[in-house]
Image: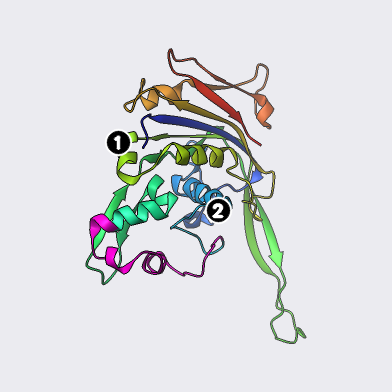
Amino acid sequence: MLNNKYDFFVVFSVKNANPNGDPLNGNRPRINHEGIGEISDVCIKRKIRNRFMQIGEKVLVQSDDSKLDEYNSIKERVEKTLAKSVLKDKKALAEAACKEWIDVRAFGQVFAFKGDDVSLGIRGPVSIHSAFSVNPVNVTSIQITKSVNSTENGSKKSSDTMGMKHRIDFGLYTFAGSINPQLASKTGFNDKDAELLKNALVELFENDASSARPDGSMEISKVFWWKHNNPNGQYSSAKVHRSVKIQLCEGVIEAKDIKDYLVEVDRLEGLECTVLEGK
């Protein structure tokens, strides 16, 4: 059982990488109208789930390129893992799913499968905000080509295929989140799970490389972690998250590296902040 509210704030850098492409915009990095870079909360939760799986925790929502079992859908994973007796009972299904999968305990889950009589939604205690860059980011686009064999024996090659690849030159991003003890009491999320989440945040980009984000191009700088002394929290999450101050170092006009920023946290009376450095 979770008796304390938690808040957290994560600072990380992106250098020559596409942290979260927008499929509706040619897979360009997501930016708003002011040029501020954005990474969706869904993308961040996917990375957290991947970290959970890499340390041996059971996860319900797995992606096709990072899967630890033979099941091809969430429905199949539920039906093959849980006892048939719980599938027709909302309360039993919720309890069994929360006990089995850490991401259900953390983020909640909607169970609504076509043809099934039972559907329910589980609210998770862990809330994750979208990530935004501290300053506007510059997006660089380059044209790429590829040649492929057009016949099975490789005797002929097709003409070069043209495409585009996009990247963020550099950006310092942040996102925040919290853990709600009231909702944790319903899913069974506990202090051990909170510790696993904290470690996952510190190691968020481990084993997460791709052609769009090579190893080392995304780096956790700091994770700020607060444990309140009661379930309701000594301060609001907004005030806790605002206590982290980020500004350009003196004399720096345009940031090109994480060292160009000064990251500090204001002390809130009675609330200790643990600062974890990225690995």
77 part of magenta stretch: yes
**Cα–Cα span, label 2 and label 1:** 27 Å
Query: Would you call the spot at circle 2 few (<14 residues within 10 Å), some (14-19), or many (20 or more)?
Result: few
Q: For residue 14, which quarter of the picture?
A: top right
Q: Which residues are magenta?
A: 66-92
Q: Amino acid at mark 2?
A: Gly
Q: Which residue is mark 1?
A: 182
Vertical order, 25 against 227 (above or below): below
Q: Quadrant of the C terminus?
A: top right
Residue positioned 49% across, 57% down in the render: 23
Q: Nearer the viewer, residue 3 or 179?
A: 3
232 to 149, vertically: above or below: above
Q: Residue 67, position in %: x, y?
A: 54, 62
The part of the image, by quadrant, that contains residue 171 is top right
**Which residue matches tag 2?**
56
Query: How are the colours assigned in the image?
Result: rainbow
In the rendered structure, the answer to whether residue 98 lies left or right of residue 223 reads left
Q: How many marks?
A: 2
The amino acid at mark 1 is: Gln
Is residue 83 depicted above or below 105 in this figure? below
**Mark 1 Cα-neighbour bin, 10 Å: few <14, some 14–19, many ≥20:** some
Residue 17 location in percent, x, y?
64, 46
